Image (spheres, coloured by chain):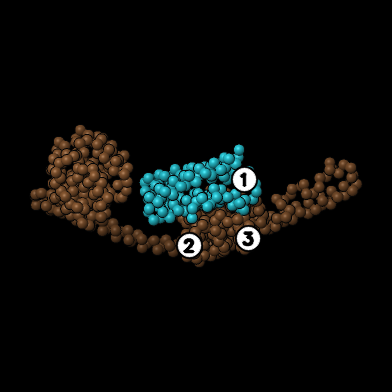
Chain colours: A brown, B cyan
Amino acid sequence: MSKEIEHVERHPKVILLCDKVEDLSGVAELISSQVDAFRTLNHFEEIQKILVDSLPLVIIIAMSNVKRSIELYSKLAKQSLLDYPHENILLCENKESGIAFRCCMKGIFNDYFVYKPMYENYRLRMILNNALVNSKKNNDIKNLTDEHFGHIDADVKQLLDDAAQYQNSTKQKLHSVRSDLAKQQGINEAQTALIDELREKYIAPLLNELESQLNSSVTELIDKLKDKQHSLSHTSELLKQSTAPNHRNLAPPLNEINLEPSQEQPLQKIQSKIMVVEDNDIYRNIIGQILIDEGYHVNCVATGLEAIKILRKEKYDLVFMDLFMPDLDGYNTTRNIRNIPNCKEVPIIALTSNKNKDLIKKWASLGLAAYITKPSTKLSILKAIEKCS
Amino acid sequence: MKTEQLQIINKDTIKQLIGDNSHEIDSFYQQFLQQAKTSLKKLADYYQQSAFNELRNEAHYLKTSATAVGAERCSYCLQQLEFSSHALDKEQCKTHLQSLSHAIKEVFYALSHQSN
């Protein structure tokens, strides 16, 4: 790796890394005719310097064999010199094309090109052009022009131009059809609005009525159970008085009869349904456990999408919502929830470790009942719920 | 702030959240250690790939549980990692990842010692 190099561009966009410059003179000439900012490099220190200074868009590697090419590329990668977006092309001998193909299939290189014993001029131009286009920063790179293609017959040229024109006009037609389709979606939007209106005016009130009837039935049942409990208590007292020595065998004291989850709990808690939306399973379980211990019906979900899906079907009395979640964050989940007919007023308590007041203010504009800074305490969480009731 | 000024595991934090039930507390500590192990591996992979956005999200994710169980040093390292990955500062990310790894080991030893 000591031969005089031929192309000495200071900030190359395309670099060719090799150990025998003389073997690649034809390839180098071809590339330089297509790209001004090109350089051939065969000293490791120089390669390092150019990668740091210029971040070339396309790296072509043509060491004496594929193994050496991979070793060089790995060495550069391990030194974190390739931690930026770039395209890489492997040049190899015909006998190693199978290995080169496998390298590309495994995603090590974007493409490969056989340059020994012979190479196909236009194929290399095509690969290079594609690499430059893919790099998306090809403003200062020459586009392929007629001069790069050599002489072709006039009728063939005409045929190519016609084909290109036909392709462009097809693309335009496709674009215009897509635009028309997008306009027609307005009709679908009108239909959706009508369905929403129907749902809001008729279906939602019907569901609410059903739910209220169910709630009344449950209340009635609980009252009946309480009456039963009272009469049992009364009977127990009577039995205690009449058969004092054996009273424990005949009727246990009432506080041992567990008719309800907790005698002290307000009834409202037992009926209240709370949803916890939090992606972190540990924190989600902690909040869930606190609420269950307090006698609430709790449903914990990990994503905003899941929450929306459930809230469309079921009514909840309160929602705890995390801010940062994958896919759909707390702000956008809240925005979607507010569009669900039954959820326009549902209290939402924000769970956040973010101290960005502006973000919370923006979120609050969608109607937050309270916000809790993680991890918080049981007391603060219960106070926040109290505030919502 | 130096991490030494923070507690390895502040038991009051989780007690103030879920109460004194030691069985429940131990269960959440175990869950945290398991999550930290998985998460640390992911963080290292994202660092290797220079995937700063993923690195930041994963750091934020683990920070939530570290804060909840009172792993103050871990939580601090994760906060710093969030900042460094946001600033695309790979060198700083490496430093905070190393500190995080150490902080997680400290939690592990502290909890193992407690159970013996």
A379 displayed left or right of A187: right
* Real-space CA distance between mark 2 and mark 1, rounded to the nearest whole angstrom: 32 Å
Does residue A379 appear in the picture of this structure? yes
Toward the right, the furthest residue is: A242
| Chain assignment, label 2 | A
Q: Tag 3's secondary structure?
A: helix
- Work out whether disc 2 and disc 3 sit on a shared chain: yes
Secondary structure type for disc 2? loop
| Secondary element at image label 1 | helix
Badge 2 or badge 3: first in the primary sequence: 2
Which chain does the numbered disc 3 sit on? A
Q: Mark 1 belongs to which amino acid?
A: Glu
The residue identified by callout 2 is A356
Residue pointed to by mark 3: A383
Q: Nearer the viewer, mark 2 or mark 3?
A: 2
How far is the residue under mark 3 from the one under mark 1?
23 Å
Residue ID at (17%, 40%): A2
Horizontal and vertical percent for residue B73?
Answer: 51, 50
Q: Do marks 2 and 1 both belong to one polypeptide chain?
A: no
Along the line of sight, the residue nearer the viewer: A8 or A324: A8
From the viewer's side, name the closer residue of B74 and A65. Answer: B74
Look at the image and tell me in which quarter the N terminus of chain A lies: top left
In the rendering, at what x and y percent does residue A299 appear?
58, 51
Which amino acid lies under the numbered mark 2 shown in the image of this protein? Asn
Residue contact between numbered discs 3 and 1, judged by CB atoms under 8 Å: no
At horizontal 60% and vertical 41% (from top left) the residue drawn is B114
